[in-house]
Amino acid sequence: MIYFDNAATTSVNDEVLKTFVTVSKNYIGNTNSIHKLGFESKKLMNAATKQVADLLSVLEDEVIFTSSSSESNNLAIKGVLEFYPKRNRIILTTILEHPSITNTLNSLKDVEVINLKLDVNYHIDIDDLKEKLKLDPVLVSIHHVNSELGIIQDIDTIGKIIKENSKAIFHVDGTQSLTKIDVNLKYVDLFSASAHKFNGLKGIALLIKKEKINLSPLINGGDSQTIYRAGTPPLPLIASFAKALRLALEDKPKAYLKVKGINNYLREELIKIDSITINSKIDSSPYILNFSIKGIKPETMIHKLESYDIYLSTKTACSSKEDYSKSIYELTKDKEISKTSLRLSLSKDSTMEEAKEFIKILKDIL
């Protein structure tokens, strides 16, 4: 099997799965219970939370565990709006965001959502950002790495400009960046990420909320890991998140170089094929390579590749079922390219041998 759909989800690391099973069996107490078993569970939860905080250079109280990046994004956006009702209900974002952000923003009432301009490389136009910050928005919400094209936004520069020119809260969706490229949270107020994107388990994610920022919770109830999300803390998932994050960060430098080499090879080979257009820019994340095959529906190619036990995707797995990529169309204004795009996404487990076999089979199919 050749699995090139890692931006949708990665395989689970055996050590991470072992941690989940071990904690599930040995720590049965509810972390909120006042007896010995509850105390032991809470002690482990606090240790896992501290490990995550240390790895991300944030405070323990700034770590909020959630069920998914979609929940984290919703908590960030809705939590800010509800807690700061007197602030201008203006949110700055881009046309390139994940559906968990765009659909959330579209569902809000009495909120003005403004898309920032992008330059020729699809990066946020800094001059436009400075101009729109004069509107005094309550929130700026953008991705670090775009899930479809791999576009990397400079969150350091963007965050610094936000802090110097406004009171806006800065939210970054880091789902496709954490453990893959360098992440600096110095100027970031809210940061979303999910474990299943870096060989962790599905069902556990986080939202980093800096100490000076407040949120209204989406889920209310009794005591939990944090006051910002009620519910019994899923201790086995929390412990496994910490393990997955540590292992992935340890592997990051070596994995990046490996993936970069594979991406370069794939790009060089794909561009030789007349019917193929590369949509991902050269400075995009090496973990994502988007391309279009003229005249062939992506679903047709997906299922043909599937017959060879090769797996990739048409666009981000959480996107709508429309027959074209909105992001690619907005950027290229080319309906043919946006209707025929495919997303190939790599992980530390991808190999050059798989890449060569993929190119050989793709050529045979074409």
Image (cartoon, rainbow, N blue to C red):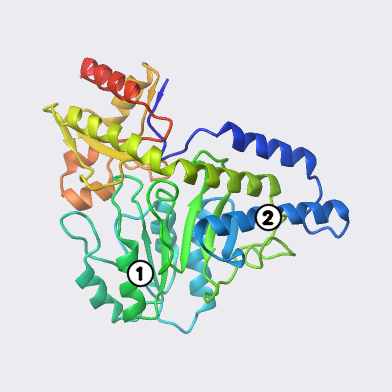
Residue 123 falls in image quadrant: bottom left
Please count the marks in the image. Answer: 2
Quick check: marks 1 and 2 in contact, CB under 8 Å? no
Q: Which residue type does callout 1 highlight?
A: Gly
Q: Which residue is mark 1?
A: 159
Viewed as shown, does residue 148 lie left or right of 57?
left
Image location of residue 358, percent across then percent down: 30, 22
SS under mark 2: helix
**SS for tag 1?**
helix
- Residue 175 placement (x, y as % from top left): 44, 50
Q: Earlier along the polypeptide chain: callout 1 or callout 2? A: 2
What mark, if any, has residue 50 been given in the picture? none
Image vertical order of residue 230 relative to residue 201, above or below: below
123 relative to 98 in the view: left or right: left
Residue behind mark 2: 47
Number of residues whose C-alpha sits closer than 10 Å to that of mark 1, classed few (under 14), some (14–19) or many (20 or more): many
Outermost residue toward the left in this view: 274
The amino acid type of the residue labelled 2 equals Ala
**Rendered location of residue 54, percent (x, y):** 56, 58
Q: What is the C-alpha distance between the residues marked 1 and 2?
A: 30 Å
Q: Residues within 10 Å of mark 2 (few under 14, many from 20)?
A: some
Q: Residue at x 42, y 54 (%)?
A: 174
Q: Nearer the viewer, mark 1 or mark 2?
A: 2
340 or 230: nearer the viewer = 230
The residue sitting at 36% across, 41% down in the picture is: 256
Quadrant including the N terminus: top left
Residue 340 is at least partly visible in this image: no
Asked whether 171 or 261 is in front, the reply is: 261
Q: Quadrant of the C terminus?
A: top left
Q: Position of residue 205 (x, y in %)?
A: 55, 51
What residue do we see at 50% from left, 58% from top? 56
